[in-house]
Image (cartoon, coloured by chain):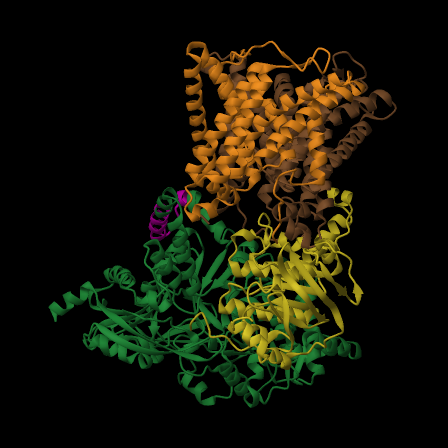
Chain colours: A orange, B green, C brown, D yellow
């Protein structure tokens, strides 16, 4: 029983960081589900949101800074929709994907130009010291950092809100229609551009939350936008179009990574957590091309 | 004089094949590339076909007909027939079966070369009308599988027969060619006369060649020059340019891939010499101006400046260097005229405005004048002298005289030269009428010599109109001016024995439809567009512009826009688009009466012939418009 | 203006299928080659060669590699940097462990190794399309970064992971001055451009473009999607591997894995998009643009008098790249090559608009 | 004369039949195809003989296109099998069917928009080209000779279908009628034994329809290609096809010569929309 202690700890730690990946992945799924655009710039939005919040928090009270950042994120969403997406309506998915890569680089450069590019500590008033759970079961209990728990709670709340939003509200259904075919949705009278604005703003807010969680864990710095690259395998596992998929995918990747690092890592030079998520995702892709939860893509000839 | 042993076309061919065996004689664009035929190839193909015909039993003196679009095998078949001492008869490719039937029957052709299934169809429909036909040779065997007529012979079949005969009698071909005499009739050429059935002019080898040699003296060309064959081969001038001249001076002939791509293929070759009909020059001028209309404002202004400056220079007799450098150099290249040494226009008079337009552009355009009966052209504008309205000076071997000139020297043009035709085939009576008592040929055209001795051709004698008030005017001259407008495709000017001049106009569909689209004017068919009020207004402005350049008495008082195109299939114009006034007067008498009766509307009920010969009907209300000069005339009268 | 096409006709299919059909184009390419081979080496100073021309040529080769995959076959790849790294380290190890092999053979084998790895990472492209494929190629990128950092065998157990390239002696002729290195790069660039152009205009090129345009239609005329996609991956990785070798051996001299990080992959992606997808010329234009822009950004503000910190310059660079990507995708998805083509078309048609 | 002439009646099929109809080239036996609950085809059997023009007709949604997709290897039927030249055909991918000599066109045109007309049709020739990778890269040996040989072949097809004037224009810019003709050209370029045409004349005006009929007849006569075509225009079907299969709601309704099928009560009912049982 005892040697299981470290296993549980690793798994729990993995699950916690998996939740953080899921938070970023959520932003991707939200936009893809509503607009069919694989938004590579989600990572940059996470960084930009966190950076704005931290810098604003320096000379504004925190709640006010938080609200202002939300406004900024909506403004960012509006600009992206207006300047990038509207001219590219109906274009091939690849073109839109590459456009978001352009947006990524712009946001990175722009963010660091305004807010400066050194590392900032984000203090959310969450106690830093780790908690110890279930000392009775395992000697020394399982080390858990409060930030992870806080992030998990937020993630859970967000998932619940979004799934309700998508499945039951009128706008939610409209979003799903838009994703299938831009022109068709437009022709039916769905106000495509207003819908996209809502979706991108929501994704901006999700990015802010993810930024806060990551920022408090790793500190707000440029590498945050590379975290987004880690969210890609999560998407692949969970399937691009399902919200629960993003969360489950995140957890699997988080746990899988830590386990692999813990057991296989040392034998082959360590640091494999960096690419292990991808290999895992690819393995699943080869078996189920549409991921665990995604809808089967039927090629109508 | 000419070398005695080179007094027939086939002999010249053999001579050239020995002199320049490897040099390219012809090229044809097919399957995307230009296939080259050297003089040796030319001779060998002609040898195969000639011996093939001989194997089929075609004898000396018989008539061989040719029906198809301009292709090397057309020319080979012609030379092959002539090598056997037969007479070649070219028939226009877009001819209706009934016309083809008349020609083949009248000429008693024994064999006919058809290009493809479409032409064979026309001949097979004739039944008894083509009783003399023993063989129908088809070149493109696509779709021929379903025909079982015994007279059908495939191209490969006749070549096989020819090669077989060549093996049996190796010197047969040379013997047949040697048997040919300069005096034998080489070509039966249809006269594009405006009367009902065309007559066949008999052109003998030696006289025909002697006249072409005179032509080459005036407009020299050599074996390194390039010519692109666009106009139909049955027309006398195309026979001169594509068959006779290459044999005499070795100029290379190029055949485009198809009618649609003709001008693009012409540009690829970059010819040094071309011959186009006025209709093609007018269409090209309209097309250039239309495309410039769509260009950017800067290009448009630059182009207008260049045309203005260029035309002024042409009137002064030289060319504007600057306009050439900036605009016309590039423009000539885009049209494929960059390497042109001499461009000719013939078959009908070309409007002076179009003429000046191309001269200003740097195209060395020269007006020809001549008749089928006189082996084609016999006057040509002198190269360095820039004149836009004369037909130039007669060839050295040609004498031209004006028969009973009136007060200002205008009379019927009569001509004589040694290369004249032998007469009309099986039509002694018509031959006698064509000549004056002292052996000069009546051209039927009215004209006069200007101060510098240049022949100015006005119009057909019987078309020289005189209004009831005694005003003499040339309908063709006014029509050419009208046709210079990009929006007028065809025009017929009336006024003979009438109080004043009026006109029937046809829109140029390609240009007017673009004009209508630019102004958001909705239209459906040709008829709907032609009868649209705005279009009639547009043509009214054009008529005003032409009237401004005419003497007061000759101005168009009233005009109407016809609801259909004038078309050779309806007999309203000849194959080379010359107006048949008698047909127009008779068929549209109602319109003409309405115009002179002062009515402003007329109902017309016209018969239309479709591509395959079946007919349909058009009826429409046409608006008759007065021009500004009508009101002034009314006041004066 | 300068185009005079009258009188240029072709009498054989060989002429009609030539790469440069118009006389003006033949003259144009001859002039460019003359400038590249004779003009530049003698007038360009060392800085121009080392800082601009050599990287431009090598990146152009890599861009051609990516263009074959993305522009011609429609398969996106975010891992070109990895294949360059594989080429570089393979050549290094070959030279190190098998010194007998001539350098050129090392280059060739390095390219083949990169091609083999490219095929392995291309396999997923058979079942998955577009965006998912981007993930597979990202995996290659991260896997390569990790491998060359963490597996010491590749870097011959050097502590920092950085290695130095052996001298560039091709059968005795050693290229060490910038001018000689420039000639090496130019030779490879011309060779790659020619081979790529030949591939693209023959059967295999048409299969790639068929897969790119409509893979269902490609399948019904007999193209096996698997072989077409894998061949695109193989060729693209081979060329990227070769470029990697040149980048390491000729341009850098000594390098560590970070030189081929994901930034390199993104820069190559920019080159292909801005330069022009589906055009060999586009790869050169894109490479030139992306190489010159940062230098331009450094020089110009100084001239104008604004002092920019290097960090600011790199941020500006990011912003400009990002904006340009979006602008080009909206305005002209086929990039600079298409603009060049439109310009040429206008010159051929002037004064006519069509 | 007017530009649009009234149509000339194509000669009746029987009268023009020159080419003998051979034995069974392709046999479809008890094919059933289901997508989840949707039953696209149920127990359909018919055959196509060598050299004939076989029409497949039926109201919309009768399963015509699905049938073509089964023959062509896109869909794999749950039951039944396909015999190609007498031998049962294993589960075939489309590119294997193509290699086997089956070419097809699509209802909504499947052309390569990024290429010119010439390149599109040259792509149809790839099965005939054997040049190795190196030969293509260096443009030597077969790499070069095959390109020139195939270019000449494709030029004959351009001439055959009278589209030589659009040789270098990108297919995206061509009018609808010409795009259909380029797709037909690409299918012919594969020199198939069986040509599957999915509504080749949909959306065409009178003149274009007449041209397309002529081309289909010529392909059948000049190259001896067996043609299976889906068509709604009854006058076309009756004119050019030798035998007709009628499908309705995925089931075989009738199979026979155009005249037999025309007066078959079941067919008339299906087409005139008599309420089903």
How many numbered marks, from 0 up? 0
Residue B297: name its quadrant.
top left
**Residue visible at 66% across and 79% down?**
D17
Residue B70, given in percent of the width and then of the height, sits at: 56, 68
Q: Outermost residue, front direction?
A: A136
Q: Is residue B2 above or below residue D33?
A: below
Q: Is residue C117 above or below residue C173?
A: below
Q: Nearer the viewer, residue C128 or B438?
A: C128
Q: Is residue B319 magenta?
A: yes
Give the main secondary structure of the magenta stretch.
helix
The segment highlighted magenta reads B305-323
Residue D30: name its quadrant.
bottom right
Residue C50, given in percent of the width and then of the height, sits at: 65, 19
A280 sits left or right of B609 in the view: right
Q: Quick check: can you spot residue C195?
A: no
Q: Nearer the viewer, residue C143 or C3?
A: C143
Q: Is residue A89 magenta?
A: no
Q: Nearer the viewer, residue C256 or B561?
A: C256
Q: Quick check: can you spot residue C315?
A: yes
Residue B488, given in percent of the width and then of the height, sits at: 34, 63
Residue B93, given in percent of the width and then of the height, sits at: 53, 73
Q: Nearer the viewer, residue B112 or A201?
A: A201
Q: Is residue B319 above or below residue B141?
A: above
């Amino acid at each position: 029983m005892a040697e299981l202690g470290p296993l549980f700890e690793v798994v729990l730690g993995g699950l916690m960081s998996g939740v953080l990946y899921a938070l970023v992945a959520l932003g991707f799924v939200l936009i893809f589900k509503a607009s069919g655009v694989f938004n590579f710039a989600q990572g940059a939005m996470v960084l930009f949101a966190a950076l704005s919040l931290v810098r604003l928090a320096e000379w504004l009270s925190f709640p006010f800074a938080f609200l202002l950042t939300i406004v900024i994120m909506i403004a960012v969403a509006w600009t992206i929709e207006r300047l990038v997406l509207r001219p590219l309506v109906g274009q091939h998915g690849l073109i839109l994907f590459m456009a978001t890569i352009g947006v990524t680089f712009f946001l990175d450069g722009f963010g660091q130009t305004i807010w400066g590019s050194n590392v900032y500590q984000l203090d959310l008033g969450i106690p830093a010291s780790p908690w110890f759970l279930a000392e009775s079961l395992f000697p020394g209990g399982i080390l858990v950092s409060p930030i992870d728990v806080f992030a998990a709670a937020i993630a859970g709340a967000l998932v619940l809100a979004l799934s309700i939003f998508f499945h039951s509200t009128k706008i939610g259904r409209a979003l799903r229609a838009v994703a299938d075919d831009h022109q068709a949705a437009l022709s039916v009278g769905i106000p495509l551009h207003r819908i996209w604005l809502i979706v991108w703003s929501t994704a901006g807010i999700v990015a802010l939350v993810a930024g806060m969680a990551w920022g408090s864990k790793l500190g707000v710095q440029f590498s945050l936008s590379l975290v987004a690259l880690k969210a890609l395998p999560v998407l692949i596992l969970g399937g691009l179009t399902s919200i629960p998929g993003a969360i489950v995918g995140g957890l699997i990747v988080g746990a899988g990574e830590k386990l692999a690092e813990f057991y296989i890592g040392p034998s082959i030079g360590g640091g494999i957590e960096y690419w292990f998520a991808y290999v895992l995702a690819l393995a699943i892709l080869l078996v189920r091309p549409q991921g665990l939860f995604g809808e089967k893509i039927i090629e109508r000839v | 004089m000419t070398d005695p042993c080179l007094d027939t076309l086939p002999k010249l061919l053999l001579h050239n094949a020995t002199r320049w065996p490897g040099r390219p004689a012809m090229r044809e664009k097919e399957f995307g590339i230009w296939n080259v035929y050297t003089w040796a190839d030319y001779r060998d193909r002609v040898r195969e076909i000639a011996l093939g015909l001989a194997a089929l039993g075609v004898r000396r003196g018989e008539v061989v007909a040719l029906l198809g679009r301009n292709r090397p095998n057309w020319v080979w078949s012609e030379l092959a027939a002539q090598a056997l001492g037969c007479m070649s008869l070219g028939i226009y490719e877009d001819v209706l079966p009934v016309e083809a039937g008349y020609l083949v029957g009248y000429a008693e052709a024994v064999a006919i070369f058809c290009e493809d299934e479409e032409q064979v169809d026309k001949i097979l429909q004739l039944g008894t009308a083509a009783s003399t036909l023993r063989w129908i040779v088809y070149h493109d065997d696509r779709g021929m599988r379903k025909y079982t007529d015994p007279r059908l012979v495939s191209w490969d079949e006749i070549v096989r027969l020819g090669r077989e005969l060549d093996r049996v009698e190796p010197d047969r071909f040379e013997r047949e060619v040697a048997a040919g005499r300069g005096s034998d009739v080489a070509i039966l050429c249809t006269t594009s006369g405006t009367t009902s059935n065309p007559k066949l002019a008999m052109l003998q080898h030696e006289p025909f060649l002697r006249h072409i040699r005179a032509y080459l003296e005036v407009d020299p060309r050599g074996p390194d020059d390039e010519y692109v064959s666009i106009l139909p081969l049955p027309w006398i001038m195309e026979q001169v340019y594509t068959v006779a001249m290459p044999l005499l001076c070795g100029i290379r002939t190029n055949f485009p891939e198809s009618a649609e791509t003709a001008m693009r293929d012409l540009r690829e070759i970059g010819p040094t010499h071309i011959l186009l009909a006025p209709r093609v020059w007018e269409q090209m001028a309209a097309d250039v101006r239309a495309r410039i209309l769509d260009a950017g404002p800067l290009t448009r202004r630059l182009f207008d400046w260049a045309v203005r400056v260029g035309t002024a220079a042409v009137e002064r007799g030289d060319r504007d260097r600057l306009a050439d450098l900036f605009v016309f150099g590039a423009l000539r290249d885009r049209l494929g005229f960059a390497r042109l040494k001499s461009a000719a226009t013939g078959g009908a008079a070309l409007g002076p405005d179009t003429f000046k337009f191309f001269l200003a552009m740097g195209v060395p355009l020269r007006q020809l004048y001549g008749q089928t009966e006189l082996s084609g052209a016999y006057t040509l504008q002198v190269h360095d002298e820039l004149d836009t309205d004369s037909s130039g000076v007669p060839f050295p071997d040609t004498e031209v005289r004006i028969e009973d000139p009136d007060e200002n020297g205008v009379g019927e043009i009569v001509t004589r030269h040694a290369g004249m035709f032998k007469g009309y085939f099986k039509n002694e009576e018509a031959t006698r009428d064509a000549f004056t008592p002292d052996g000069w040929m009546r051209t039927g055209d009215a004209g006069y010599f200007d101060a510098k001795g240049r022949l100015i051709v006005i119009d057909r004698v019987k078309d020289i109109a005189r209004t009831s008030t005694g005003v003499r005017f040339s309908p063709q001259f006014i029509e050419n001016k009208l046709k210079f407008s990009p929006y007028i495709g065809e025009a017929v000017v009336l006024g003979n024995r009438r109080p004043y001049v009026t006109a029937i106009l046809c829109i140029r569909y390609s240009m007017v439809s673009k004009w209508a689209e630019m102004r958001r004017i909705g239209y459906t068919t040709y008829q709907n567009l032609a009868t649209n009020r705005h279009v009639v207004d547009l043509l009214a402005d054009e008529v005003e512009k032409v009237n401004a350049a005419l003497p007061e008495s000759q101005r168009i008082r009233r005009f109407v826009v016809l609801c259909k195109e004038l078309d050779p299939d309806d007999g309203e114009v000849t194959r080379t688009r010359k107006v048949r006034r008698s047909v127009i007067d008779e068929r549209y008498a109602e319109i003409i009466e309405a115009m002179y009766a002062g009515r402003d509307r007329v109902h017309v009920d016209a018969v239309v012939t479709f591509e395959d010969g079946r007919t349909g009907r058009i009826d429409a209300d046409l608006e008759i418009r007065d021009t500004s000069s009508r009101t002034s005339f009314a006041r004066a009268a | 203006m300068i185009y005079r096409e009258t009188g240029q006709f072709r009498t054989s299919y060989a002429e009609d299928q030539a790469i440069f059909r118009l006389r003006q184009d033949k003259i144009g390419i001859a002039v460019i080659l003359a400038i590249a081979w004779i003009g530049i080496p003698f007038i360009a100073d060392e800085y121009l060669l080392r800082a601009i021309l050599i990287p431009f040529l090598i990146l152009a080769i890599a861009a051609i590699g990516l263009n074959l995959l993305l522009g011609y076959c429609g398969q996106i790849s975010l891992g070109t940097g990895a294949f360059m790294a594989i080429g570089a380290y393979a050549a290094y190890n070959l030279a190190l462990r098998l010194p007998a092999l001539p350098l050129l053979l090392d280059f060739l084998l390095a390219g083949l190794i990169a091609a083999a790895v490219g095929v392995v990472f291309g396999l997923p492209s058979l079942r998955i399309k577009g965006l998912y494929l981007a993930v597979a190629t990202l995996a290659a990128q991260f896997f390569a970064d990790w491998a060359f950092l963490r597996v010491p065998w590749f870097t011959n157990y050097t502590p920092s992971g950085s290695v130095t390239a052996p001298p560039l002696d091709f059968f005795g002729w050693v290229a060490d001055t910038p001018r000689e290195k420039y000639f090496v790069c130019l030779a490879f660039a011309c060779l790659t451009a020619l081979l790529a152009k030949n591939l693209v205009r023959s059967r295999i090129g048409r299969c790639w473009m068929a897969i790119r345009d409509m893979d269902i239609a490609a399948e019904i005329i007999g193209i096996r999607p698997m072989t077409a996609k894998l061949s695109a991956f193989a060729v693209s990785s081979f060329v990227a591997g070769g470029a990697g070798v040149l980048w390491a051996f000729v341009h850098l001299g000594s390098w560590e894995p970070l030189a081929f990080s994901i930034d390199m992959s993104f820069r190559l992606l920019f080159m292909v998009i801005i330069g022009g997808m589906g055009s060999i010329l586009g790869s050169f234009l894109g490479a030139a643009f992306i190489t010159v822009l940062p230098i331009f950004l450094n020089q110009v503000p100084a001239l104008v008098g604004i002092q920019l910190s290097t960090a600011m310059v790199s941020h500006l660079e990011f912003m400009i790249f990002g904006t340009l990507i979006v602008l080009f995708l909206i305005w002209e998805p086929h990039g600079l090559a298409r603009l060049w083509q439109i310009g040429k078309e206008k010159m051929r048609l002037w004064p006519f608009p069509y | 004369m007017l530009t649009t002439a009234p149509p000339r009646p194509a000669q009746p099929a029987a009268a023009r039949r020159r080419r003998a109809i051979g034995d069974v080239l392709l046999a479809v036996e008890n094919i059933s195809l289901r997508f989840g609950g949707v039953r696209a085809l149920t127990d359909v059997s018919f055959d196509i003989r060598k050299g004939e023009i076989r029409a497949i007709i039926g109201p919309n949604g009768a399963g015509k296109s699905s049938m073509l997709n089964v023959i062509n290897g896109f869909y794999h039927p749950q039951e039944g099998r396909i015999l190609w030249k007498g031998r049962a055909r294993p589960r075939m991918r489309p590119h294997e069917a193509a290699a086997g000599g089956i070419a097809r066109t699509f209802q909504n045109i499947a052309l390569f928009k990024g290429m010119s007309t010439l390149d599109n049709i040259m792509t149809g020739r790839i099965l005939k080209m054997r040049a190795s990778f190196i030969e293509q890269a260096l443009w030597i040996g077969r790499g070069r000779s095959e390109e020139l040989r195939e270019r000449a072949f494709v030029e004959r097809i351009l001439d055959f279908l009278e589209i030589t004037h659009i040789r270098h224009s990108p297919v995206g810019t061509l009018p609808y009628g010409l795009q259909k003709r380029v797709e037909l050209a690409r299918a012919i370029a594969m020199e198939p034994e069986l040509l599957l045409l999915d509504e080749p004349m949909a959306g065409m005006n009178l003149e274009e329809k007449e041209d397309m009929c002529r081309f289909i007849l010529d392909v059948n006569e000049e190259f001896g290609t067996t043609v299976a075509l889906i068509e709604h225009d009854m006058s076309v079907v009756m004119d050019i096809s030798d035998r007709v299969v009628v499908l309705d709601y995925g089931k075989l309704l009738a199979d026979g010569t155009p005249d037999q099928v025309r007066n078959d009560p079941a067919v008339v009912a299906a087409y005139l929309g008599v309420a089903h049982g």
